[in-house]
Amino acid sequence: MTLETTAATEAAFSIDSIKELMDGFDPAALLPDISTVVGKVELACRIAVIVGPIVLLVLGIAYLLLSPKEANYYFGYRCFFGMGSVQAWRFSQRIAGLTFAALGLVLTVIMFMISGGFSGMAAMDMAWRAVRCLIWEAVLVLLATLAINGLCMFFFNAKGEPRQKSTNSRRRA
């Protein structure tokens, strides 16, 4: 590479020196190998699909084993009907723990089986399957949350008192 000086004594590159420099340059050499890119996409898809169920499993076990004995605003499954009394609080923790632990365990097994099939897939197919799995996980967690809240609402009133059986059904029998 040669530098030529101009009349104003500034250094300038000549076209020949730039051509000479670019002769041996291959821009494709800057890109990573496609096998490593697909490997990283596969790893990211596996992690994305499996993290949610494992967190759900850990959360369920924590609600079962580590929840406080009384209602609080820091830790535990909080719902309107489960915070009225100690009995309602313990019921909501037990139901939430069992539901989330069971759902987390089942989803972990299923997602391990699904992610096992990622190795032979194209990168885009793998990414879209992971997105579908994440959507299903979110829908199942939403349904579990609604079921827990519904059970708490069915068994307890807003003050946390157990709901009484209807006396009309006793009279009819």
Image: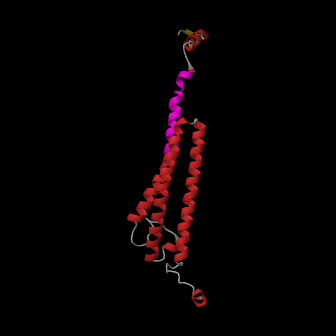
Asked if residue 49 lies in the magenta stretch, the reply is no
| Front in this rendered view, residue 37 or 120 | 120
Q: Residue at x 44, y 65 (%)?
A: 76
| Front in this rendered view, residue 44 or 1 | 44
Residue 119 locus on image (x, y percent): 52, 37
Q: Which residue lies furthest to the bottom in this view?
A: 171
Residue 64 locus on image (x, y percent): 41, 65
Q: In this view, does 145 lie to the left or right of 97?
A: right
Q: In this view, does 173 lie above or below 113?
A: below
Q: How many labels does the image show?
A: 0
Predominant secondary structure, magenta span: helix
Q: Is residue 73 above or below residue 157?
A: above
- Image: magenta residue range: 28-48
Q: Which residue is drawn at 44% across and 76% down?
A: 87
Q: Is residue 116 above or below residue 10?
A: below
Q: Is residue 143 visible?
A: yes
Residue 83 locus on image (x, y percent): 48, 73
Q: Can residue 66 be seen in this view?
A: no
| Front in this rendered view, residue 67 or 109 | 109
Split into 4 quadrants, where in the image is the C terminus? bottom right
Q: Which colour scheme is used?
A: secondary structure
Q: Which residue is drawn at 59% across and 90% down?
A: 171
Residue 14 locus on image (x, y percent): 59, 11
Indicate the quadrant where residue 9 lies.
Answer: top right
Asked if residue 42 lies in the magenta stretch, the reply is yes
Q: Which residue is drawn at 45% across and 60% down?
A: 101
